[in-house]
Image (cartoon, rainbow, N blue to C red):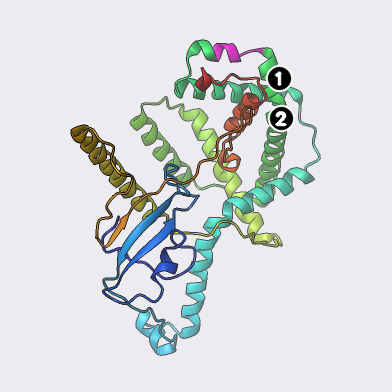
């Protein structure tokens, strides 16, 4: 549910069906709209779930853009012209857009650097880094509640060799990228300002203090400096290299903040209705009909159960591999290969 929610009529901003159900409505009209929550919703209890909204149109307005003239630009800031205002706006938009695709851009640049770096990476280095990552993965398992005895069972030469094989390519690639960025920084005289390092260190230090975690200043400072230096080199390459940007269509964007709020309120309402239903059944000793009343408010939801596919026996569950860390990828790879035991199945 939601009160006085602003809905901008446009595709891809909200759950499927909301905008389509409001087209043609006038102020004072109430529409019953069937919608589907986005599959990309962080709250997976509602992701992809169907719902019914009773929406009352309280007011309507139309957005219009002013004509950009020299007079208008001068009103925005004295001395601006239409041309200089457009240039500043374009620069601001480009700056915001670059923040969104910078991770993908950096990943593409890193891949290109690793491919042109012809260097033999010692197996000792791969083994040492794989050992560190394997230890971190075991520590994460412990932090996530896996019993020490179960973790000990997973620590064996055979499991480590399987893990090393999985992460080797990423370790080799990262080593080559580190060598390349260090050399580019040296040749081009790229430095990271001290204040940027200190800002990052202070932020990490505060987070460690709040979470009561150990803070190894020397080790963390080294990682912070390396990360900032790599970012600076990537920015330098992006500015001086000829990059061809290819936009790949993915999932439509939507108003994530509104979706999360509606999802939370929908869950709360569903819980209240379930509690009322259970209380009514206890008092009468009879089953409660499945049909539930829909409250008449500005926007109320009545969640409906979406069909759930039963997992086939022996099949690996679907996972969002793209958002996983390297350790998570390796862990699930070992798990699916039978090298690690899933304690949740006990």
278 to the left or right of 134: left
Is the residue 45 above or below the residue 34 in the image? above
Residue 182 point in image, percent of width and height: 66, 42
Residue 133 point in image, percent of width and height: 60, 26
Is the residue 279 above or below the residue 57 in the image? above
37 to the left or right of 138: left
Q: Which mark is residue 161?
A: 1
Which quarter of the rendering shows the N terminus?
Answer: bottom left
Residue at 41% in and 63% down: 18
The picture quadrant where one finds residue 208 is: top left
Residue 225 point in image, percent of width and height: 54, 39
Q: Secondary structure at mark 1?
A: helix
Q: Is residue 155 magenta?
A: yes
What secondary structure characterizes most of the magenta part? helix
Q: Is residue 89 magenta?
A: no
Magenta-tinted stretch: 151-156
Circle 2 residue:
168
9 to the left or right of 248: left
Residue at 48% in and 74% down: 88
């Amino acid at each position: 549910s939601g009160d006085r929610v602003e809905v901008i009529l446009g595709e891809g901003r909200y759950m499927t069906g909301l905008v389509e159900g409001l087209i043609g409505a006038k102020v004072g009209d109430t529409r019953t709209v069937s919608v589907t929550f986005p599959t990309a919703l962080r709250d997976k209890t509602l992701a992809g779930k169907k719902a019914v909204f009773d929406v009352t149109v309280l007011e309507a307005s139309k957005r219009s853009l002013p004509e950009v003239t020299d007079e208008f630009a001068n009103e925005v800031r004295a001395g601006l012209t239409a041309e200089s205002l457009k240039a500043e706006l374009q620069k601001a938009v480009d700056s915001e857009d670059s923040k969104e695709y910078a991770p993908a851009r950096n990943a593409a640049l890193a891949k290109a650097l690793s491919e042109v770096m012809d260097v033999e990476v010692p197996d000792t280095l791969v083994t040492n880094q794989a050992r560190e990552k394997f230890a971190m993965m075991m520590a994460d398992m412990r932090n996530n509640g896996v019993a020490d005895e179960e973790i000990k069972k997973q620590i064996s030469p055979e499991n480590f060799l399987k893990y090393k094989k999985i992460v080797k390519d990423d370790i080799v690639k990262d080593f080559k990228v580190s060598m390349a960025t260090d050399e580019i920084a040296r040749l081009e005289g790229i430095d990271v300002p001290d204040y940027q390092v200190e800002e990052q260190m202070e932020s990490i230090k505060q987070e460690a203090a709040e979470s009561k975690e150990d803070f190894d200043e020397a080790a963390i400072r080294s990682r912070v400096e390396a990360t900032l230096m790599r970012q600076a080199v990537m920015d330098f390459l992006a500015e001086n290299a000829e990059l061809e940007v290819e936009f790949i269509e993915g999932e439509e964007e939507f108003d994530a903040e509104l979706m999360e709020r509606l999802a939370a309120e929908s869950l709360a309402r569903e819980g209240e209705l379930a509690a009322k239903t259970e209380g009514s059944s206890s008092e009468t000793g009879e089953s409660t009909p499945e049909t539930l009343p829909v409250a008449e408010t500005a926007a109320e939801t009545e969640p409906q159960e979406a069909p759930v596919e039963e997992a086939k026996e022996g099949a690996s569950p679907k996972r969002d591999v793209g958002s996983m860390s390297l350790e998570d990828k390796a862990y699930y790879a070992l798990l699916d290969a039978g090298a690690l035991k899933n304690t949740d199945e006990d």
